[in-house]
């Protein structure tokens, strides 16, 4: 595990940490030659809508701050894994899985 990521998971507020995770996902897709935008929409009831846009396609997932906090405590990469899994279920294709980032994220249980 990356010591910096562990420190960030412990020290950052969940909304800032989640934005960081989305930026990591966006950068990973950019390295695959894809241009995506990542957005977080907060709802007053603690629910969070996350959207990835690639061209005309949009991929959505709903979660909540409590789930994200629990995952962040479990493992510094657990939020990444959950978001990637839910985005894939929504139709986002992750073609190349051999990067260091994706290898780390996919090893999280």
Image (tube, rainbow, N blue to C red):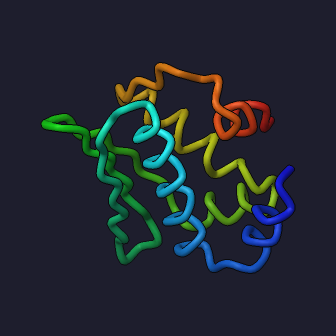
Percent coordinates x, y for residue 54 in the rendering: 25, 39
Q: In which quadrant of the rendered view does residue 88 lie?
A: top left
Where 30 sits versus 16, above or below? Answer: above
Residue nearest the observer in this picture, 38 or 71: 38
* Residue drawn at point x = 33 percent, y = 44 percent: 60
Q: Where is residue 3 in the image (x, y as percent from the top left)?
A: 86, 62
Which residue sits at x=33%, y=35%? 34
Rendered residue at 80%/35% (across/down): 109
Residue 58 is situated, as x and y percent measured from the top left of the image, at 23, 40
Quarter occupied by residue 67: bottom right
**1 and 88: which is toward the camera:** 1
Q: In which quarter of the image is residue 99?
A: top right
Q: Is 25 displayed left or right of 5 in the figure?
A: left
Nearest the eye: 109 or 105: 105
In the image, is residue 12 above or below residue 66? Answer: below
Residue 63 coordinates in the image, percent (x, y): 48, 54
Residue occupying image coordinates x 62% and y 60%: 68
Determine the residue located farthest toward the left in the rendered image. Answer: 56
Farthest residue in the top direction? 95
Is 4 on the left or on the right of 106, as rendered? right
Number of marks in picture: 0
């Amino acid at each position: 595990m990356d010591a910096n990521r562990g420190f960030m998971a412990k020290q950052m507020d969940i909304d800032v940490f989640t934005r960081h995770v989305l930026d990591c996902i966006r950068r990973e897709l950019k390295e695959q030659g894809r241009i995506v935008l990542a957005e977080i929409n907060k709802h007053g009831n603690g629910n969070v809508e996350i959207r990835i846009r690639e061209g005309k396609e949009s991929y959505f997932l709903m979660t909540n701050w409590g789930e994200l906090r629990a995952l962040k405590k479990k493992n510094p990469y657990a939020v990444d894994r959950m978001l990637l899994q839910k985005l894939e279920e929504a139709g986002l294709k992750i073609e190349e899985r051999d990067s260091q980032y994706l290898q780390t994220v996919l090893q999280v249980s």
